[in-house]
Amino acid sequence: MPRLRNPAPSYSAHKQSGRGRLVWYDSTGARQQKLLPGAYGSEESLRAKATLELEVATSPTRTRTEEPAALTMAELLVAYLGHAAQHYRGPNGKPTSEFDEVKLMARVLRDLYGDTTAVTFGPLRLKAARQKWVTAGLARSECNRRTNLVRRMFKWAASEELVPATVHQALTTVTGLQRGRTEAREPDPVGPVDDAVVDATLPFLNRHVRGLVEFQRLTGCRPGEACALRRRDIDTGDAVWLYKPTHHKTAHRGKSRVIAIGPRAQELLVRFLTPDLDTFLFSPKGALEELRAARAAARKTPRYPSHMRRNAGKRKDDPRRAPKDRYDRTSYARAVARACESAFPPPAPLAQRADETASEWKARVIGEQRARLGEWRRTHHWHPNQLRHSYATRVRKEFGLEAAQVALGHTRASTTEIYAEKNEALAVATANKIG
């Protein structure tokens, strides 16, 4: 592994000219240097040194020794990925999902234009990259999202003086793909899920994932907010408990989030409360412990000492896939998807056979059969985000749009309208009386 370079600039004397020189390494690992005005150690040289050190500390990706025209797209992508790794981080220091999106965007630009200069990247090349995402089958909204990420990267590059501002201005002229006017796949809108479908899935979930599902149905919170629930974050002082997540979607914008927990949700949470205030209520580790305890209780043969010694020798002290303390959005959604597979198995030609592995099943179901399997899953599967849509629709129907906006924690009512389906029954009753 190569030795990590010290990014702090070093000040030394240039032997040929007697002037001061500053040497540093930027975030891409490239060595940079600059001769300073005045003799080494003079007031003029030290003043220029302090100025340049401040600029390097503020913008470690800026290369003052190169003209912007010489910067390649590959170098720009490396610099921006370094910035994104620091910028798109949660309070725990881990990269957010936005950083993964940036990496996917950068991969395409590197393959297409990695050897070209950054200043030559214009609207036509941006459209070409977008077309590659369209051809790959990405939804129209995702193609527009990644296009915006490219523009955001060049906006940052212009602010760092890596490219002229005119490059970013030219990219802003590219409009997003519009519905019905592009060959990009149109995604299915996310809507509420029927309660009967959710109820049919619950028997195939463990107790902790069932608790996540029921908590979302009763509060309308986001999947990530339900996964992060701890006893410490719940205010139980009043009849209605208040859950204040420490981390949520709009926390970086200074927004607060309060989730009201009513009597039914309180009755649900009581079954998961532990003495430790920092323990996550819905935990894969807890689910595994309960599973092992149930298996031990159902054991019919006695625990022979020789058998226990053999199991202890086989057990790993540090297993590669140790259960985590909490679910995240991905593991939660994966558990629901597997439960849907069990609750709504596809027809015999499409289902996995008893004598084949998952990889053999994927190799067998191809072409038209794979398309049919995908259609079956879209019809019979659901994901945790739909529970939030169902809750919003119910609240809007019974209490109005403003109540749904407050319950979901939205700043604008227009955002709530995306989640809450309109009450068509009200329109029918109005037409029956007036029309």
Image (tube, rainbow, N blue to C red):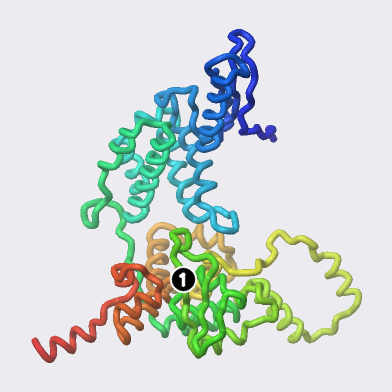
Q: Say which residue appears at 48% left-offset and 46% top-offset.
A: 103
- Which element carries disc 1, helix, strand or loop? loop
Location of residue 398 in the rendering, given as x and y in whole percent from the top left corner: 32, 87
Location of residue 163 in the rendering, given as x and y in whole percent from the top left corner: 39, 31
Location of residue 410 in the rendering, given as x and y in whole percent from the top left corner: 37, 70
How many numbered discs sit on the rendered protein?
A: 1
Front position in the image: 181 or 388 = 388
Give the labeled residue for mark 1.
257
| Quarter of the image where one finds residue 435 | bottom left
Q: Say which residue appears at 13% left-offset and 86% top-offset.
A: 431
Front position in the image: 358 or 145 = 145
Residue placed farthest to the front in the image? Answer: 43
Residue placed farthest to the right in the image? Answer: 305
Tell me, yes or no, if residue 348 can be seen here.
no
Amino acid type at image mark 1 = Arg
Residue placed farthest to the left in the image? Answer: 435
Taking 53 as reference, is 372 left or right?
left
Taking 202 as reference, is 319 left or right?
right
Location of residue 275 in the rendering, given as x and y in whole percent from the top left corner: 70, 81
Tell me, yes or no, if residue 53 can be seen here.
yes
Label 1: how many Cα within 10 Å (few below 14, some 14–19, many 20+) = many
Front position in the image: 273 or 325 = 273
Q: Say which residue appears at 49% left-offset and 83% top-offset.
A: 261
Of the 4 image quadrants, the one containing the N terminus is top right
